[in-house]
Amino acid sequence: MISLPVSSPFSVIQHRFARAAIGLLLCLCLWSVSAWAWAVNVNVATDEQLQQIKGIGPKTAALILEERERGGPFVDFQDLQERVKGIGAKRAQSLQQEGLTIEGGAQAASSTVGR
């Protein structure tokens, strides 16, 4: 007589749970990589790159570029809010959530202080 393995309902649930957990982990990993890949650094971005951020249109992109040219790199989001008309705390937070980053501003600002 041939005996076939019989899986209990509990092992089926365990297997499904494990597959769901692996799928969720994979989705989270891909999401974090895609968020990193789409990040736009306000201190080096072009007009087109800035406009890829939801909430930045041609006018805001132009204002950011003009202020960056005039005043140098942005140090942080507070600096961005103070220097660019139309960007307040809520909008800055929204832009950050959409992938706008500010990198290199503090180092660039401190290196030009002694000159």
Image: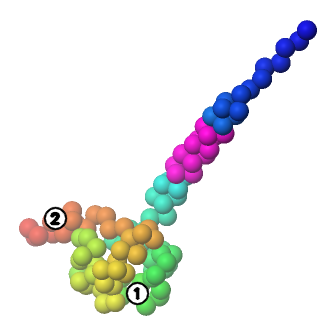
Sooner in the amino-acid sequence: mark 2 or mark 1: 1
Residue 69 visible in the shown view:
no
Crowd band around label 1 with a 10 angstrom C-alpha radius: few (<14), some (14–19), many (20+): some
Q: In which quarter of the image is the C terminus?
A: bottom left
Residue 17 lies in quadrant:
top right
As drawn, 13 above or below 49: above
Judge by depth and name the residue closer to the eye, 3 or 91.
Answer: 3
Residue 40 lies in quadrant:
bottom left
Amino acid type assigned to the residue bearing label 1 in the image = Thr
Mark 2–mark 1 Cα distance, whole angstroms, equals 28 Å
As drawn, 64 above or below 103: below
Residue tagged by mark 1?
60
Tell me if 6 is positioned left or right of 17 in this view: right
Q: Label 2's element? A: helix
Could you say where residue 110 lies in the image, as x and y percent from the top left? 15, 66
Could you say where residue 36 lies in the image, as x and y percent from the top left? 46, 58
As drawn, 36 above or below 91: above
Q: Is the magenta stretch mostly helix, strand or loop?
A: helix
Q: Label 1's element? A: helix
Could you say where residue 33 lies in the image, as x and y percent from the top left? 50, 53
* Discs 2/1, front: 1
Point out the stretch of residues depicted in magenta: 16-29
Q: Which residue sits at x=43%, y=90%?
A: 59
Amino acid type assigned to the residue bearing label 2 in the image = Ser
- Return the mark for residue 111: 2
Residue 36 visible in the shown view:
yes
Q: Which residue sits at x=45%, y=77%?
A: 50
As drawn, 6 above or below 113: above
Q: Quadrant of the N terminus?
A: top right
- 21 within the magenta span: yes
Judge by depth and name the residue closer to the eye, 108 or 13.
Answer: 13
Q: Which residue sits at x=37%, y=81%?
A: 91
